[in-house]
Image (spheres, rainbow, N blue to C red):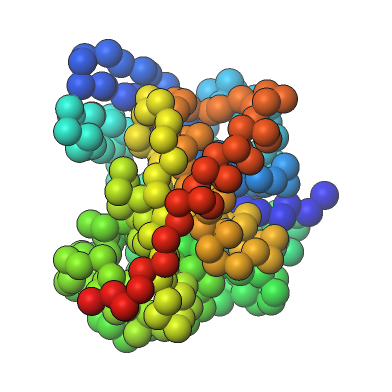
């Protein structure tokens, strides 16, 4: 069966230390968070990622129970699965410390050639993978495999010294780029969110969603029209993957042919679900109705930014 929505990224096992000293060990992270966002709106989701020989079977089983196709997981027998400390401070700041070798993790990441046939005709690929110089080739291959597919990208290694010409190569192939505020500042050199969005549009992105945590997000389309979307109130348990889940929800919205604002509304709802749980979620029968309730809440509060400075 074809997978409609795929994240092309990684799986990382997180060991989490909260500000009060409590810990949660052996928690699945990485691409899981984008899957969480997709799964709110679709039951045809999958992940392409490299894992090591030591990935706990409970994680595979948890993904499958969550409704995720895992045929895109590539087992690298010579590797350990990537593992990180996630250290949270009271002000919300997070420090990630990779516990496995970053160079090997980067070198042996999933490649386009690893994709199973079920992933080669997706509606949308969510991409959070590789260094900027590697992205044009990957994006071209994904487009060739599924010419009608949309491409949604998050930044993996945001750097300020990437030539603008390379960003233009990347942006021109995307349907959406969604950085957070810090990432946008790093690559554009601009601190104002609206100015950052305009710069990304100038580089060729057709649509930008700039994430600002509790302050919500800004959506700007290719004409320069922009909107502010609120963060949906929720009981925050773990902020690790809110932004990734936002992009997962946006992925499905675009794939279903929704206009950018409606797709972005799905994104903010998806983020709210990710924030209130740790690790692999589980859905129950009340989930769809709650998602629609949150969607209605957000729709009533979205605001177009008129004559932005």
Q: Which residue occupies 61% across, 32% down?
A: 290
Up-down relation of residue 197 to residue 94 (above or below):
below
Marks counted in the figure total 0
Q: Quadrant of residue 161?
A: bottom left
Q: Position of residue 269 (x, y in %)?
A: 52, 43
Q: Which residue occupies 70% across, 74% down?
A: 148
Q: Which residue occupies 26% across, 22% down?
A: 17
Q: Nearer the viewer, residue 198 or 185?
A: 198
Q: Is residue 151 left or right of residue 304?
A: right
Up-down relation of residue 285 to residue 217 (above or below):
above
Q: Quadrant of residue 114?
A: bottom right
Up-down relation of residue 64 to residue 107 (above or below):
above
Q: Position of residue 263 (x, y in %)?
A: 57, 59
Q: Position of residue 217 (x, y in %)?
A: 37, 56
Q: Position of residue 254 (x, y in %)?
A: 61, 63
Q: Which residue occupies 43% across, 31% down?
A: 234
Q: Is residue 291 left or right of residue 2?
A: left
Q: Is residue 50 visible?
A: no
Q: Quadrant of the C terminus?
A: bottom left
Q: Nearer the viewer, residue 90 or 152?
A: 90
Up-down relation of residue 146 to residue 113 (above or below):
below
Q: Is residue 173 visible?
A: yes
């Amino acid at each position: 069966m074809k997978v409609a929505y795929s994240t092309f990224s990684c799986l990382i096992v997180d060991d989490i230390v909260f500000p009060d000293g409590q810990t949660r060990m052996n928690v699945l992270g990485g691409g899981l968070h984008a899957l969480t966002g997709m799964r709110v709106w679709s039951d045809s989701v999958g992940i392409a990622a490299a894992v090591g020989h030591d990935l706990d079977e409970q994680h595979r089983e948890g993904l499958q129970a969550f409704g995720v196709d895992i045929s895109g997981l590539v087992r690298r027998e010579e590797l350990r699965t990537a593992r990180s400390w996630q250290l949270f401070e009271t002000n919300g700041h997070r420090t990630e410390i990779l516990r496995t070798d970053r160079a090997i993790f980067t070198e042996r990441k999933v490649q386009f050639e690893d994709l199973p046939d079920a992933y080669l005709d997706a509606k949308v690929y969510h991409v959070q993978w590789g260094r900027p110089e590697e992205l044009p080739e990957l994006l071209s291959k994904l487009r060739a495999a599924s010419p009608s597919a949309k491409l949604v990208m998050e930044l993996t290694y945001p750097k300020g010294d990437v030539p603008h010409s390379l960003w233009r190569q990347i942006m021109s192939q995307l349907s959406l780029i969604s950085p957070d505020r810090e990432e946008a500042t790093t690559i554009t050199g601009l601190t104002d969110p609206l100015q950052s969005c305009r710069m990304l549009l100038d580089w060729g992105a057709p649509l930008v969603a700039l994430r600002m945590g509790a302050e919500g997000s800004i959506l700007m389309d290719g004409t320069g029209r922009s909107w502010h979307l609120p963060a949906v109130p929720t009981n925050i348990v773990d902020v690790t993957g809110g932004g990734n889940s936002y992009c997962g929800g946006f992925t499905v919205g675009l794939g279903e042919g929704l206009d950018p604002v409606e797709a972005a509304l799905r994104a903010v709802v998806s983020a709210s679900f990710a924030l209130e749980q740790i690790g692999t979620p589980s859905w129950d029968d009340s989930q769809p109705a709650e998602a629609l309730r949150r969607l209605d809440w957000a729709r009533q509060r979205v605001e177009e930014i008129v004559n932005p400075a």
